[in-house]
Image (cartoon, rainbow, N blue to C red):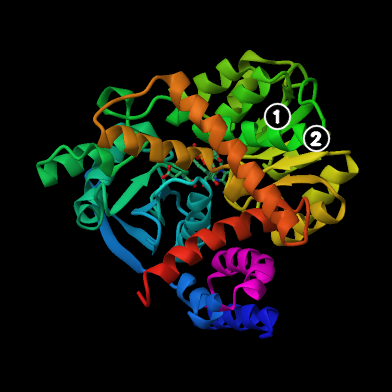
Amino acid sequence: MADMKAYVQEVLAQVVKKDPEQKEFHNTVQEVLTTIVPVLEQNPQYQKAKLLERMVEPERVIMFRVPWQDDQGEIQVNRGFRVQMNSAIGPYKGGLRFHPSVNLSILKFLAFEQVFKNALTGLPIGGGKGGADFDPKGKSDNEVMHFCQSFMSELYRHIGPNVDVPAGDIGVGGREIGYLFGQYKRIRDAYDAGVLTGKGVGYWGSLARTEATGYGLLYFVKNMLDDKNIPIEGKTVVVSGSGNVATYAIQKAQAMGAKVVTCSDSNGYIYDAAGIDLAAVKEIKEVRRGRIKEYTVTHPQAEYHEGCTGVWSVKCDIALPCATQSEIQLEAAKQLVANGVIAVGEGANMPSTLEAIAYFQQKHILFAPAKAANAGGVAVSALEMSQNSERLTWTFDEVDHRLQNIMTRIFQQAKQNSAQYGCPGNLVAGANMAAFVQVADAMLAHGVV
Ligand code: NDP
Ligand code: 2IT
């Protein structure tokens, strides 16, 4: 039998050699490939078809100049990207991130994750990701609109309802999707509602898309806890971030009877022993686009601490990282475990480093990996595409009900695969293997493309 561990190491070495600076991409490829060895061993046809070599190479990468004029009349130039990673099971699908840190390594990591996450949803979507090194913080609505219009003036050539369907991610919410859609419609002179998801409900966005990632995360975590007969009621929860994913994770955790004591932004975190007042967070972040520090103005009993990583020193039963990649490093993982954490659910993409994941697993912490646990957002995006295709809209309850079923199915798939391939309870490996087989089989069926 061919040595599949050696095959994986060979492919990883090639990935590092080709793009030595793309650390985030290396990490995610390593996480996926090292966990799918049992599948490769039972299916030698995958190696024969050089599927790993093909999967780590994006089908297409688009990189473009985004010039725009700020409110002072100065010309600004940003860099735009779209990574079209894999279309084996559907049109490329994945968010757009506007953040100064955006580069090709981060977008390739996100696109690679997206391919497998999207497969787990069981819906017909391939994987992609895009964005720009644009910083929406402190920009006026007018500046954001001009940026979005310039960005779409290039991106429109590469997307479409059956080609590539972007949505939001960090720095891209309802406002940005609105401006992007307006420009796409104008340039194409066609009402292709299904070209973007996360649209406003007034122009064919799906109900429950805004809530979907955070709600889906809690549905997944609840499945994971139920499986061990652990109730979520009364548990203390630490959440990082205060954006889209964090907000609706907090809402659903509270609705399930848990007590959420923190939230954060890139400057610092809030600890409110009385439980986070979500209406106040929404007012600060969604309405005023302010900083989380302002929470203490109306809630003087709460504490504000500078620095966002300190949030993991707060004692809790359940930790939900919902801000960004690599926010839980080994030290933070050790702190969480020392404080008695029983479960970690990843709302953000790759928030735990490989060392942190290994430590959680070694300590038998229940661990819900990002590509399974945060798949609810893109799943409801796919449901938005379905509604747009049939030119109908579903009720909030209809969408939410489907979301719950999808998250339960993803949990079951990850659990079953982990048992089937000899690592019961390892949901990281289980999710990776379940997703990989789906993408691999579709690629095999398509021949050498
Ligand atoms: P938002 O832009 O709405 O919120 C991001 C939050 O994370 C903000 O509180 C932000 O703080 C904080 N944050 C961003 N970058 C950093 C950083 N470098 N260090 C510390 N904090 C940071 O984004 P989302 O909520 O949409 O996304 C959060 C995470 O969830 C990302 O990893 C994203 O990829 C992932 N995700 C999103 C989905 C979606 O549907 N939106 C679906 C699945 C995953 P600040 O305001 O200071 O920047
Ligand atoms: O990381 C993600 O899954 C997202 N940002 C959502 C992508 C989408 O197309 O809804």
Question: What residue did someone put label 1 on?
Answer: 262
- The quarter holding residue 179 reads top left
Q: Position of residue 108 (x, y in %)?
A: 47, 63
Residue sitting at x 58%, y 70%: 26
Residue 359 vs residue 368, the one in the foreground: 368
Q: Identify which amino acid the numbered label 1 is placed on.
A: Thr
Q: Identify which amino acid the numbered label 2 is placed on.
A: Val
Residue sitting at x 60%, y 82%: 13
Q: Position of residue 116 (x, y in %)?
A: 52, 56
Local crowd size for mark 1, using a 10 Å CA cut-off: few (<14), some (14–19), many (≥20): many
- The quarter holding residue 267 reads top right
Ligand 1 within 8 Å, label 2 CB: no
Residue sitting at x 34%, y 68%: 60
Give left or right: position of 312 versus 207: right
* 210 inside magenta stretch: no
Q: Position of residue 192 (x, y in %)?
A: 20, 40
Q: Position of residue 296 (x, y in %)?
A: 65, 20
Question: What residue did someone put label 2 on?
Answer: 314
Residue 246 vs residue 69, the one in the foreground: 246
Say whether marks 1 and 2 touch (CB < 8 Å).
yes
Magenta stretch prevailing secondary structure: helix
Magenta residues, start to end: 19-44
Q: Secondary structure at mark 2?
A: loop
Residue 12 visible in the current orientation: yes
Residue sitting at x 40%, y 39%: 381
Local crowd size for mark 2, using a 10 Å CA cut-off: few (<14), some (14–19), many (≥20): some
* 29 inside magenta stretch: yes
Q: Secondary structure at mark 1?
A: strand
Eyeballing the image, is 264 above or below 272? below
